[in-house]
Amino acid sequence: MTMPLYQATAVRQGLGCSLRPGGDYLTRRILELTRPDAHQTVLDAGCGPGATLGLLRARGLYNCLGLDRDWPFLSEAKNDTLTVLQADLPRLPLADRTIDMILCECAWNLTPQKNVLAEFSRVLRPHGILAITDIFARTFDAVEGAWPVPCCFAGATDLETVRSLVVDAGFTVTLLEDHSRLLRETAAHFVFAHGSLHGFWLAVTGSTELADQACKASQVTKPGLFLLIAKRNPL
Ligand SMILES: C[S@@+](CC[C@H](N)C(=O)[O-])C[C@H]1O[C@@H](n2cnc3c(N)ncnc32)[C@H](O)[C@@H]1O
């Protein structure tokens, strides 16, 4: 199978260890809006190489935990003061109602979304906070089979589907914002680095045919970027 987009050298070179559009902009927005207390337990679900864990620690949140299935990313994230665990998001190795807040940044679309929301709902305390940032598709019907590599774009739904999946999993959505500007800025960065969007996809896939397919997928699915914040309903 083709390597996932977030593991491609062209992406790591462009984004460093914040593997999502906009770097830490939306993470800072989440923390501004939700203001977790220092004693609260915060899970970064799909933490990748650990940029957000570093930011949480810098904000004085010492009870934070990073979880990812990719060991090379976790070993980048790991240090003496950070707790990281290798695990699969649909099977969280965590007890029921033990977490105060979950951040899931550009990882949810890579997973079976309903199962992962059920797990988030299980491990969060009542009124616990869930913050998801990910890609949405303005033309949801065009997504299936459109993308040539595993990536957040390939698992995207439209904003109304995102909202209803989260509500059906037992949450109250308190905010759903469109931050597509950050996705456009990231795309512009890759265009400058590789000459064109096609050049970027060629660097990622190594194939003109797959690069053509990715450019077409972008045109037909019309991707954007969302931030969702929700509260787990009490039982
Ligand atoms: C696009 S990267 C984002 C990483 C990080 N959240 C960030 O914003 O920099 C997606 C991450 O989700 C992780 N991931 C994908 N599917 C997963 C799963 N089923 N269980 C755990 N982690 C998963 C990948 O290994 C990768 O680190």
Image (cartoon, rainbow, N blue to C red):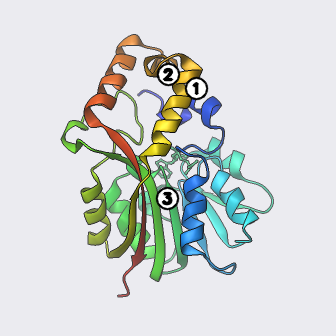
Q: For residue 104, which numbered disc appears in the image?
A: 3
Residue type at the position of mark 3: Cys
Q: Where is residue 40 in the image (x, y as percent from the top left)?
A: 63, 79
Q: In this view, does 94 lie above or below 29?
A: below
Between the residue at mark 2 and the residue at mark 1, the CA separation in whole angstroms equals 7 Å
Q: Where is residue 51 in the image (x, y as percent from the top left)?
A: 66, 51
Q: Are marks 3 and 2 in contact (CB under 8 Å)?
A: no
Q: Can residue 230 be seen in this view?
A: yes
Between the residue at mark 1 and the residue at mark 3, the CA separation in whole angstroms equals 23 Å
Q: Name the residue under label 1.
A: 10
- Extreme residue toward the top, this view: 208
- Extreme residue toward the bottom, this view: 235
Considering only order in the chain, which callout, 1 or 2, is on the residue closer to the N terminus?
Answer: 1
Q: Quadrant of residue 67?
A: bottom right
Pick the front one: 92 or 193: 193
For the C terminus, the quadrant is bottom left
Dot 3: within a 10 Å radius of its alpha carbon, few (fewer than 14), some, or many (20 or more) residues?
many
Residue type at the position of mark 2: Phe
Q: For residue 36, which numbered disc appears in the image?
A: none
- Which residue does the image show at 47% across and 50% down from the upper left? 107
Considering only order in the chain, which callout, 3 or 1, is on the residue closer to the N terminus?
Answer: 1
Q: Do the residues labelled 2 and 1 touch (CB within 8 Å)?
A: yes
Q: Mark 2 points at which residue?
A: 200
Considering only order in the chain, which callout, 2 or 3, is on the residue closer to the N terminus?
Answer: 3
